[in-house]
Every structure is written in structure tokens, then in C-alpha cells.
Amino acid sequence: MSDVPRAGDHSTDHHTFSLVQGGPLYQLLRRLRLSGADLQMLRRRVAVILAVLWLPPLLLAIVEGHAWGGAGVPFLADIGMQVRFLIALPLLLAAERAVHQQMVGSIPLFIKRGIVDDAHHARFAEAIASARRTLHSIPLELALLAFVYVLGFSGALLELSDAAWHSTITDGRRTTTWAGWWLTVVSLPLFQFLLLRWYVRLLVWWRFLWQVSRLRLKLQPLLPDRLGGLGFVSRLSAAFAPLLLAQSALASALIADQVFYARASLSDFPLEIAGVGIFLLATILVPLFAFAPCLARAKLDGLAAMEVLTMRTARQFSRKWLRPHATGEPSLPDDPDLHSLADLRDGYELVCDMRLVPIGMPALTVLVVAALAPMLPLLLTTFSPMEMMSGVAKLLF
């Protein structure tokens, strides 16, 4: 039977944890039947939120004549606007579902696999309880709303040209359109609230991983995951890929707006592109380094134990088979002693290959692709598809 509990199973609640369950918005969505206990109804949730954040500006822009013309940057030509709400926003919501499904099945494995020492079960449960208290905090979410409104995190409307769908210029004076007001007062602040809420969750996740890494962890260096039994942490990290994809897509769209409408060049943004990729990967990978000391300790202990066992077995083998014999040659290939030496060699190689950070190549590849792939279409602002295909053909052939 699998040791992974089903989502929604509350029989081990004190050892089950999800970054995206709880909080006033979560409870509100459940009361409005836009979410289940395990973040179901994703399509309904996306549709309703888009109907509030994206549809009204579109309708107002149509009424004002700025939807597909009549302005320097019409509504439907605003790349940043469309990507922010039609791509990044659904991905932020999809990331909640992906992370929740992995997390409720993975966190109990610290206990079920015996990784957390029995004496530290209470501290592990307290780390979960502390994270839950933060995530369920009503004042915290109200503070985030206050931050995006009172402190003006939503900022002024992005001025890509002398006139755009969200503002008009008459006699040198800029006037915000009704669609622009909806964007400023409703759409942008609420989108940024959802994004900031994710960063609060990541901070909670960082703290939780650090607290767990400071417990007495019983890692097994001979396990084939080469992570002492922490392979599920790597798989869990890959679940954050939609979050990275959403932010990278938004950054790419904002750069594209500058290239198309502000006469910028892609060569003006090398540091921004590299910085976005590095920052996004760091938000997921850096907290995993908290496990490096305990993984290094487990690896050193495992190597020492394997060396002692290998030495003992090699001596026994030598005493039995490497002395002069009066009779004929022994049949070594079928002897169990020889197989024991081979098994010890394989085990020693497993310990030697043990990694010091709980991230595997498949999970790392997923995260790198999510962080960088949305930047690739920016190349089309500099090179035509035919030029790119020609360059690739020259490299390959």
C-alpha cells in the first residue's frame, strides 16, 4: 500500500500541510462555490476572476472605441495586459492546485518514512502549525491589500506611448479612460495581491524547510534516489513550475511591449532577462540548500560505514579464496562471496553519488524551462522565424 495519503485525508492532519489551503480569500472562494477543499473547480475559478478583472476593461474599451483602434496602443494590442490576465493569472491559480496536490501527499512522508526522528515529531508538528497560523492570518491578507492600494504598489498606468487605451491626451493633458480606471482600481491591485500572496507563501515555505532541516533527520544514503530518502522534496519543488512560468511570461510580455511600442530593442534588456531567470529559480532552489548539511553528514557517515563493511568483507574473502589451495581451482563466479563484494561496490557507488541538495535533474529541468521558455519568443522581435530556422540549420548541418 502506498505511503502517500490522499488529498483531503484528515486522519493525519497534524502531519499534513498545504501552502494554499487557508486564509480569508480561500474561505471566500469556498463559500462562493468557486473552490473545493482541495482547490477543485479551477476552470470555474479562472472564469469568474477573469470576468471581474479582464472582461470589464475590455467592454469599457469597446464602448470608448479603444479596444482594437482609436489609441496608440489599443486594448487588444496591449501585450502586457493580455498576458497578465489571460496567461499569467490562470497559471497563478493553476499553481495553487499543482502545489497543493503534491504537498498534501509529500509532507507526511517525513514521518511515514521515518526521516524525522521520533523524538522530534512534536517539533515537526509545531513547524506545520506555525506555518498554518501565518497562512490563515486575516490581518496578513488585509495588510497585503492595504499595501497594493495605500502604498500604491499597483502604481501608475504603464505609459507605452503618448496615448493608449487606458488614457487619452487632449491639449497636452492626460486623462484616464473608464477602462483605465477599472484597471487601476480593480484589475491591477487584485492581480498584484494574488502575486504578493504567492510570495508570502514562498516565505512560509522557506521557513518551514529551514525548521525541518534543523530536526534530527534519519537519512538513508543507500536509497536509489541518491537523496537519502528526500527525493519527494525534489518532485514537490517541480510543482512550483506554473508559478515560475506565470512570472516569466509576464516579464517577457512587458519587455515585448517596450520593444513594440516604446521603440526599445531587445538588446536593451539582457540584465533584466537574466535577472528574472535567476531570481525565479532562486525562489525555489535556494531554500533546498538548508538540507545540505544533513545530506553531507549522511553521505560522510554512509561512506565511513561502507568502507568498514567493505574492508571486513574483503578480508573474509581473502582468507577464504586467496590462500594457496591443495586441491583444484575454486569456482568463483558462482560463489556468494563474490556477489557480496559486487553488491558492496554498487552500494558504495550509490553513497558516492549522493547529492547534497534535494533536487534531481528532471525537476531542475522542469523549473529551468518554466523560468526561461517564455523569454524565447522575444527573439522574434529581433530575428524573423526564417532567420532563426536558418541559423539552427547551420548549427546542425
Image (spheres, rainbow, N blue to C red):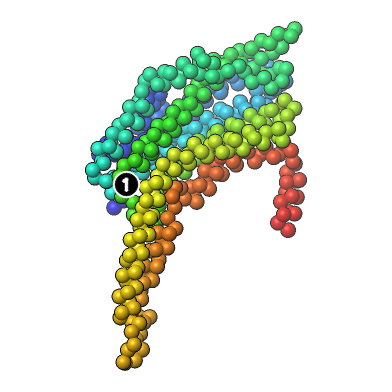
Quadrant that contains the C terminus? bottom right
Q: Residue at x 38, y 39 (%)?
A: 209
Image coordinates of residue 339 in percent, x first then y, are: 35, 74
Q: Amino acid at mark 1?
A: Leu
Q: Residue at x 29, y 52 (%)?
A: 1
Q: How many marks?
A: 1
Image coordinates of residue 74 in percent, x first then y, are: 68, 22
Label 1, on which residue?
Answer: 217
Label 1 Cα neighbours within 10 Å, binned few <14 / some 14-19 / many ≥20:
many
- In the picture, measured across the screen, residue 267 lies left or right of residue 122, that is right
Q: Which element type, helix, strand or loop, lies under badge 1? A: loop
Compared to residue 324, the image places residue 102 above or below, namely above
The image quadrant of residue 12 is top left
Compared to residue 213, the image places residue 30 above or below, namely above
Q: Residue at x 74, y 38 (%)?
A: 382
Q: Residue at x 62, y 18 (%)?
A: 157
